[in-house]
Amino acid sequence: MTRTLSHLDTLANTYWQSVVARSPLTMTALGLPDRQDEYDDLSPEGLAATARLARSTRAAIDGVTLTDSTDAVTAAALRERLGLIVETHDDEADLTNISNIESGLHTIREAYDLMPVATESDWATIARRLHAVPPAVKGWFASQFAGIEAGIAPARRQVDALADQCAGWIADTGFFAGLLDQARTACPGLSATTRDQLAEGVAIARRAYACAIETLRDKVRPLAVVEDGVGRARYELASRFFLGMTVDFAETYRWGLDQVAELEARQAELCAGLRPGLTVAETKRALDEDPAYLLDSPEAMEAWMQSKADGAIAALDGVHFDIPEPARRIECLIAPTHDGAIYYTDATDDFSRPGRMWWSVPEGQTTFSTWRELTTVYHEGVPGHHLQCSQAIYNRAELNDWRRRGIWVSGHGEGWALYAEQLMADLGMLDDPAMMLGMLDGQAMRAVRVVIDLGIHCGFAPPTEVGGTEWTFERALAYFNSHVAMDPDVAKFEVMRYFGWPGQAPSYKIGQRVWTEIRDEAQQREGAEFSLKAFHARALGLGALGLDTLRWALGNH
């Protein structure tokens, strides 16, 4: 039975409709056809408009009568999320976003990953959006300089990293030039007119990014700071935004160190059985060279990911989860960039475009070790992000549109996905010891993130194993490499991410901790009546929430 929309649902939906109406990029993410040749306003004026909308909507909640427990959760979620948007804007912390993984220049480029490419009309739209790149870049830079003027300067290390990334995107073998080859492959009958418009658009976008590189290096870098850490005050706000809760940083830092030690001990025990006589590092290198766990091309990796994702859905559906029929389809794809990231993108509202797992393979990488990546498939697919996001999208009967599509809280989402990795081990889906080692290695990386991220930005002393009284990039990289097995270039990218995106990386492991605590609390309350399958269904049925709101909702409703 479908729940009747309440007055609060209408308010939330009106807010969400307003967000979508002024954001062509959100329309792209949702698979909507409107304004696909435009960009969002990334300027200070655009950010101010976003904050005004959040402020007015939050104020309106007090005038609405709540009708049921679903309304109560919605009200709590709206107050928490919109309040953080307003607080971030009032602190001018929404202006500056320069890093190797998150920036307006990333946002502008990533728009094309989800755009349709099958028809002449699709490519004509892409061509027009490429023509719109220069003003979008200009608006974003206006925010960066406003942030610097407000006293929030980026770190020089991140400015350099972003400029280098942009250089890769505009290279002759980079992303923008690759659109021309993609068009020829995806739509062989493309007319000369559209081909010319596309080529002109690619040239315009490449010039805009070339100018962006020049601006970053010649104008932003001289104003950037050498210090990487943002300090306790800025970190506290960022952490609350990513978690939806406040944590004790000193306790969490100690917990992170303990988690690294615990996971390392578990790996040592497993490796003693896998490769007797070898160290953990030697065992991992041996597995990397073992033909049983090797694939020799990106295409083979893509096919392997797809088979494992499909296999997980088949094994879990109807047994441990009741997966909605439209969510039983996921696409696993090699991304059109080479940044080393792995990520998930939502399905459209009608699931005509399915959820997708993307792998951005580093330039030149041609072999892949599957022993360490099966857990990643579960993280991005089922029971991880794909199930989590699709369950919320599908739940029209209970949730308003904002609850289904308009919230993403990293601690909730990434915490669930990391929880899902451990869950698959608990359910016996990682019975190959090498694959179990891959899961533990991934979990250790997320624990290392907690240590490095909090250490850098909150000023905690590094472990004695890396020496010194404060974190440096070199010490962070050494600490990372001593606890995580990863390609050197990818490892450097990972550590750079922690330096440039404060609070986001720890949200995985902290979120997993909270998810586990909430489950254990429910089991203690319910005793013999507790059902893990029912708990998961109830939790995922709520959609994304801040972690404090999630704990309250599952404990009281």
Image (cartoon, helix red, strand yellow):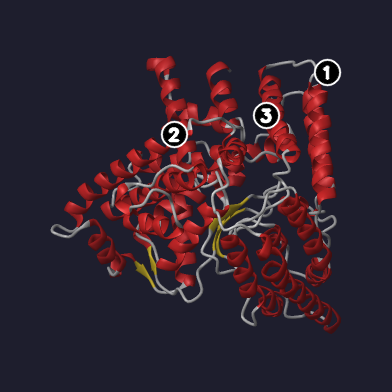
Q: Are marks 3 and 1 in contact (CB under 8 Å)?
A: no
Please tell me which residue is depicted at 61% across the width and 43% down the height of the picture: 390
Please tell me which residue is depicted at 81% across the width and 30% down the height of the picture: 57
Disc 3 residue type (three-letter): Glu
Pointer 2 or 1: first along the chain: 1
Residue 106 lies left or right of residue 357; in this view the side is: right
Disc 1 residue type (three-letter): Gly
Pointer 3: what residue? Answer: 80
Pointer 2: what residue? Answer: 250
Q: Quick one: quadrant of the N terminus?
A: top right
Q: Nearer the viewer, residue 423 or 329?
A: 423
| Residue 353 rendering spot, x and y as whole percentages | 67, 55
Please tell me which residue is depicted at 58% across the width and 18% down the height of the picture: 557
Q: CA distance from mark 2 to mark 1?
A: 40 Å
Q: Is residue 142 above or below residue 430?
A: below
Q: CA distance from mark 3 to mark 1?
A: 17 Å
Q: Secondary structure at mark 1?
A: loop
Disc 2 residue type (three-letter): Ala
Q: Is residue 506 visible?
A: yes
Pointer 1: what residue? Answer: 63
